[in-house]
């Protein structure tokens, strides 16, 4: 059994049920595990959960501020792995491209 959780900002994550315990319905505990690479932003772009997902990375955003937030997230979490990002405006969309910085 899997469930997808939708957050207020429109992003989603999927979790799978990996265990159930408890002696009665009132005491039941459901244990869920994150499904790798299932986190998506409001535009459907992957939210990287590893340095391998962060570089190379490309996402298209309908709002420039969403692209800027993803860039800031990726750089903050994965810059230790020399991940750098560029934002490029294209019509009504903004494209974020991240890569391993050779410097």
Image (cartoon, rainbow, N blue to C red):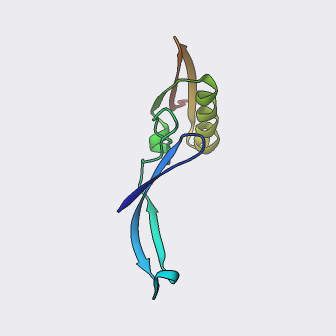
**Which quadrant is the C terminus positioned in?**
top right
- Camera-side residue of 70 and 40: 40
**Vertical placement of residue 35 versus 69, above or below:** below
* Outermost top residue: 91
* Outermost bottom residue: 23
**Vertical placement of residue 91 versus 64, above or below:** above
Which residue sits at x=45%, y=41%? 53
Q: Please identify the quarter of the rendering in which residue 52 is found.
A: top left
Residue 103 visible from this viewpoint: no
Which residue sits at x=42%, y=48%? 38
**Vertical placement of residue 8 versus 57, above or below:** below
Instruction: Answer with left or right where residue 31 lies relative to residue 84.
Output: left
Residue 91 visible from this viewpoint: yes
- Camera-side residue of 53 and 15: 15
Residue 82 in the image: state x and y as whole percent.
57, 37
Q: How many marks?
A: 0
**Which quadrant is the N terminus positioned in?**
bottom left
Which residue sits at x=58%, y=38%? 74
- Camera-side residue of 25 and 9: 25
Instruction: Answer with left or right where residue 24 lies relative to residue 72.
Output: left
Q: Please identify the quarter of the rendering in which residue 19 is found.
A: bottom left
């Amino acid at each position: 059994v899997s469930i997808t959780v939708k957050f207020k900002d429109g992003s989603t994550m999927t979790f799978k049920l990996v265990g159930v315990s408890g002696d009665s319905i009132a005491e039941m505990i459901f244990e869920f595990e994150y499904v790798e690479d299932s986190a998506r932003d409001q535009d459907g772009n992957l939210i990287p959960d590893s340095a391998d997902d962060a570089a190379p990375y490309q996402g298209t955003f309908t709002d420039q501020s969403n692209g800027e937030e993803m860039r800031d997230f990726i750089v903050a979490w994965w810059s230790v792995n020399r991940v750098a990002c560029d934002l490029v405006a294209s019509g009504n969309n903004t494209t974020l491209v991240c890569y391993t910085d050779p410097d």
